[in-house]
Image: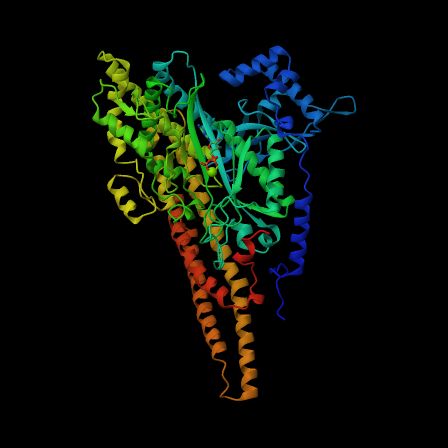
Amino acid sequence: MPAYPAFFVIMDNPRFTLVRDAFRKQALAIDTPAEAPSKYFGELVFGREKMRRYLDPATFSALEKCIDNGEPLDLDTADMVAAGMKQWALEHGVTHVTHWFQPLTDTTAEKHDSLLEYDGKGGVIESFSGSALVQQEPDASSFPSGGLRATFEARGYTAWDPASPVFIQDDTLCIPTVFVSYNGEALDYKTPLIKSLKAVSDAALPICRLFDGRVSKVINYLGWEQEYFLVDEDLYSARPDLMLTGRTLMGHQSSKSQQLDDHYFGAIPSRVTAFMKDLETEAYRLGIPLKTRHNEVAPNQFEMAPIYGEANLSNDQNQQVINLMHRIARKHGFVVLLHEKPFNGINGSGKHCNWSLGTDTGIPLLAPGKDAAGNLQFLVFFVNVLMAVQRHNGLLKATIASATNAHRLGANEAPPAIISAFLGRTMTGVLRRILETPSDAPVVIAGKKGTKVGALGIPDIFVDNTDRNRTSPFAFTGNRFEFRAVGSSANCAGAITTLNSAVAEQLKDFMLSVNGELSKGKPRNEALIDSLKPLIAKVIDTVCYDGNGYTEQWKADAARRGLDTETCVPEMFRQFTTPESVAMFTSTGVFSSRELEARNEVKWDKYVKKVQIEARVIGRMATNHIIPAALEYKRQLLEGLSLEKSVFGDGACGNTETGIVKDISFLVDELRSKVDALEASREKADVIEGDYEKALAYHSIAESLDGIRGPIDRLEEITDNALWPLPKYREILFIS
Ligand code: ADP
Ligand code: MG
């Protein structure tokens, strides 16, 4: 017997079966709280009801003004708020506090400080001051900053974002914060998101006020759909590629994968249900309103979505859920994979960001209205969003681009690497009708029963009417746009910030045009429609596309329409610093050009490191796992042949064995030379100085990894199953 690696695992391995059985039993025995979720929903969040209970009325009112209107909080009030929070936290067994922030890495960051302080009388007390609540200076020099923090002033500050409620995780009070440099430049995802919320509200407000003078704020809503894979922890641990890169760099397709379409919406395996229940219970305690859960298309792939909410809070909740998922999965013997494409040949994971706007008077701005004026307001926002997407389609693609999402985009089951918008037949018809009708005549469209529903009427059936086009990266779905191109591992804030800023810029330009028309003495509706028409004419045959986004024809058509068709991720990032993007981000106050440049450095650097890790891992696995296993099988075959020859003499058969031996030799040689070539190109790339240039070199390396995988997967196909040192797709992909 050859010596197997310590982690050698195959399906029939008794050790593995035992582990699985233990988790199966646990799944059946899982306790869910007897109480209805509404009873414990939000119990670990310091929300308004707790504020009212734990703060005196004056402090509560000051804090409410700070949350709702962005009014500053003085230090005395902060001290009072902190005292109330401390009391509540101690009642929940809290011993530590942390500023919880979202740096430009793939995860959230936290540094826990104990509440313990000397009391000056020889003892200790629990202490938490207003200044500790409001601001901290984490030792942050090792977070990515793209040179915004020169080492001599390597300070990063975290500052409380009162709009996101404080919550408890285990024994720790977590304070959601922004993370900025000494000069106030954003080092995180949250800061620009908050700026973009203000930008889009400020830009939308004058338009809303044309319809209703009572509107004082426009709110951005986000409802994310999180897709993910679950794999058994043991199998994960036996795959260095999964552990170190989050995806399988090799692995022959399972004979059965998703071709029978039997996983989507199928019965959820009981072990997975147990995990989901546990996750939901914890999420509800944190006030996260998880609503749907189901199997996704690929085996072992699942999805969940909450009830949508205010974008900043909803995004925090997505980050919290991600943390919870990783933690709770381990309790159930699973590991969560958030990589956009963990397995070749089966669907990848996205994070659809459902995006909409609404007024503080409760009117949704991306849903048809109740009357003609409501419909006109809807059309104004609808068309301006499309125009913003048209103007910045390349940039929007850049916001969702990453080394990991690159494997999903453009593949045959995910949004293509071209940003277009799906409207559906009804809305396309409405837009065309507007173009054909004189602006001072009412636009009349048949309603549900063929009756006329008045100027700018939209059929009542409309909301149910939007067809589902899964190939579109940005689809209108009745009361919102669904940005589907966002990757499952992404922080939604990246995409939402850009979308908000682009829409804000477009709405400001639109308002200028409307004011121009109004100053000519035109009535409101006519002024609005006259300003809309050129936009409709522009978007209808460019960014609006209802066809199949997966076809080759679309790629050619999109290029003709002037849409960005770039497929190289490092190249896409340059969209952030084009004159149009810089003008858009600076005019809306969301990013300075220095911040944009710095963030691009971070993006290129992250891209390089991710591909670099993959290249190292595949090289080492080829050398240390695959080639030895293949050679061992070859040795056994040769031994058998030689034995055969010694018994039967030269005329012995053994054609099968010699055939396999030759195939192995050929594939091992091919693999070896490809790994050598990879090492050589990595050495060359590593000495390149510029971030962008280096990322381009690593882009070619990324493209070459599939070529290395080729001989490995063919070796897997012909090598003795018992000798193969890695769990195979068929073993990893079917939870039972
Ligand atoms: P589907 O898979 O059919 O797109 P899901 O129910 O899985 O739908 O998810 C839809 C998501 O969109 C949910 O998070 C939901 O709360 C959110 N959503 C619904 N309406 C809006 C809206 N007006 N604005 C933002 N998000 C919304
Ligand atoms: Mg869904």
**How are the residues colored?**
rainbow
Residue 78 placed where, x, y %? 60, 17
**582 relative to 554, above or below:** above
Residue at 61% from the left image edge and 19% from the top image edge? 49
Quarter of the view holding residue 440: top left
Residue 114 % position (x, y): 68, 30
Q: Is residue 712 above or below residue 219?
A: below
Residue 179 visible in the displayed image = no
**51 or 363, which lies in front?**
363
Tell me how many marks there are.
0
> How far across and how far down the image is residue 479, in percent?
40, 28
User: Which of 387 and 37 lies nearest the eye of the viewer?
Assistant: 37
Looking at this view, name the residue that lies furthest to the right.
Answer: 122
Residue 722 found in image quarter: bottom right
Residue 64 in view, yes or no: yes
Q: Position of residue 648 (x, y in %)?
A: 54, 88
Residue for point 61% across, 38% down:
277
Side of 513 relative to 277 (left or right): left
Q: Quadrant of the N terminus?
A: bottom right
For residue 77, side relative to residue 512 (left or right):
right
The quarter of the picture where residue 84 lies is top right
Q: Residue furthest front?
A: 449
Above or below, 583 against 674 in this view is above
